[in-house]
Amino acid sequence: MSTTHFYGDDCIPPHKKYEPDPEKVKDFEDKLKDVEARVAEAKSSAGPVSEFEDMISQASAAYDEWCQRRHQEGAEKYGPVKFLEANTFEEAMAEVVDLGNYARYTFIRLYLLNQSMDSAVGTMAFGDNKFVFNRDKIGG
């Protein structure tokens, strides 16, 4: 009686192992190289879009670094597996409430900034036109 392992190639009987068609593999690799070349060309000619993508990548990397740093600090302060003893669902709910409050505070700051900008519009004239900060000022 044979034992079937459910990992790796052990779960596929030897007589049913898949062998890819070399021509199809070559065709796929050629198409992949073509797509990669077109993507590289588009990125190099994209100008501001490419710069924006770089900024997004930098922000993503900063997020990863910040998460790793916070993880390390927590492990050093509380121990590497302290999170297993904590009710992480309850802690996450508290963080969501904090996030909601931060969203409210940010809304209030943006609201006040917008009000301040709206009141400054009357003093910022460019020829016969006035610089407009929002749709309300142009009747939209």
Image (cartoon, helix red, strand yellow):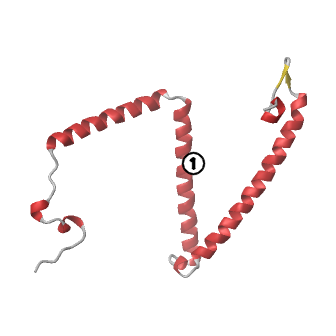
Q: Is 4 on the left-hand or right-hand side of 131?
A: left
Residue under the image location 56 percent in, 52 percent down: 62
Amino acid beneath label 1: Ala
Q: Residues within 10 Å of mark 1 (few under 14, many from 20)?
A: few
Relative image position of residue 95 (x, y in whole percent): 66, 67
Mark 1 lies on residue: 59
Q: Is 104 on the left-hand or right-hand side of 30?
A: right
- Report the number of discs: 1
The quarter of the rendered structure image containing the C terminus is top right
Residue under the image location 25 percent in, 39 percent down: 29
> In the depicted view, which residue is nearer to us: 83 or 66?
83
Looking at the image, the residue that sits furthest to the top is: 127
Q: Is residue 134 visible?
A: no
Relative image position of residue 91 (x, y in whole percent): 63, 73
Position of residue 13 relative to residue 138, above or below, is below
The quadrant holding residue 139 is: top right
Q: Is residue 22 visible?
A: yes
Position of residue 113 relative to residue 75, above or below, is above
Residue under the image location 71 percent in, 61 percent down: 100
> In the depicted view, which residue is nearer to us: 109 or 80?
109
Residue under the image location 25 percent in, 68 percent down: 7
Q: Is 57 on the left-hand or right-hand side of 3?
A: right
Instruction: Indicate the secondary structure of the residue bearing disc 1.
Output: helix
The quadrant holding residue 31 is: top left
Relative image position of residue 115 (x, y in whole percent): 86, 42
Looking at the image, the residue that sits furthest to the front is: 140
The quarter of the rendered structure image containing the N terminus is bottom left
Relative image position of residue 73 (x, y in whole percent): 58, 68
